[in-house]
Image (cartoon, rainbow, N blue to C red):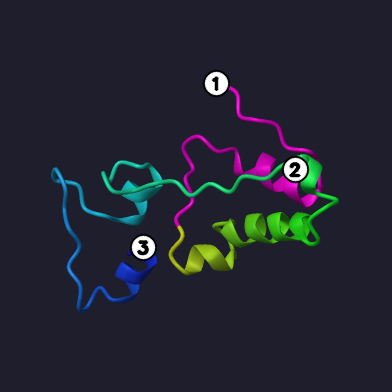
């Protein structure tokens, strides 16, 4: 189950603490909670013109994950702030710029 479900039912569910770390917004967003996992979406730039609505989907997804007013955020999806430059990703998606693989 996801954090959103746990959060909505906290009156009847008890979260599992693992190695002394409880699932919470902060521990999940930093991937400190051992069961926290990132959610990735993979897209091929060359499919943008072939898949109707793909660009709009990415733009809507990025807007929805915005911690300020994003509706996905309010439904329990926890953004991972530590390694993601949200403003750059949002700008690329909204401006329909081609995305590049991450560099380390």
Mark 3 or 2: in front is 3
Residue positioned 66% across, 59% down in the render: 63
Q: Position of residue 95 (x, y in %)?
A: 81, 48
Between marks 2 and 1, how big is the CA–CA gap? 19 Å
Q: Residues within 10 Å of mark 1 (few under 14, many from 20)?
A: few
User: SS for tag 3?
Assistant: loop
Viewer-side residue, 57 vs 92: 57
Residue 85, by quadrant, is: top right
Which numbered disc, 3 or 2, marks the residue that appears first in the sequence? 3
Q: Position of residue 52 (x, y in %)?
A: 81, 61
Q: Which mark is residue 104?
A: 1
Residue 42 falls in which quadrant of the image? top right
Q: Position of residue 74 (x, y in %)?
A: 49, 68
Which residue was labeled with disc 2? Answer: 92
For the record, the magenta segment spans 78-104
Q: Is residue 79 magenta?
A: yes
**Image vertical order of residue 87 relative to residue 78, above or below:** above
Please give the name of the residue rendered at 30% of the width and 41% of the height, measured from the top-left corner: 32
Could you tell whether 42 is left or right of 29 in the image? right
In the displayed orientation, state which residue is furthest to the front. Answer: 50
Q: Residue at x 75, y 56 (%)?
A: 54
For residue 74, which numbered disc appears in the image? none
Q: Tag on residue 2? A: 3
Q: Which residue is found at the position 46% from the left and 37% from the top?
A: 82
Q: Mainly helix, strand or loop, the magenta region?
A: loop
How packed mark 3 is, by other alpha carbons closer than 10 Å (few <14, some 14-19, many 20 or more), is few
Residue 4 is left or right of residue 88, and the answer is left
* Element type at mark 2: helix
Picture quarter with the N terminus: bottom left
């Amino acid at each position: 189950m996801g954090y959103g479900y746990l959060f909505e039912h906290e009156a009847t569910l008890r979260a599992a603490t693992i190695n002394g770390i409880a699932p919470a917004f902060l521990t999940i967003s930093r991937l400190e909670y051992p069961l926290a996992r990132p959610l990735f979406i993979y897209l091929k730039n060359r499919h943008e013109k072939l898949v109707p609505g793909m660009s709009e989907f990415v733009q809507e997804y990025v807007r929805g994950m915005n911690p300020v007013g994003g509706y996905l955020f309010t439904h329990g999806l926890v953004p991972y702030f530590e390694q993601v430059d949200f403003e750059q990703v949002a700008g690329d998606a909204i401006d329909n710029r081609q995305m590049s693989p991450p560099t380390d």
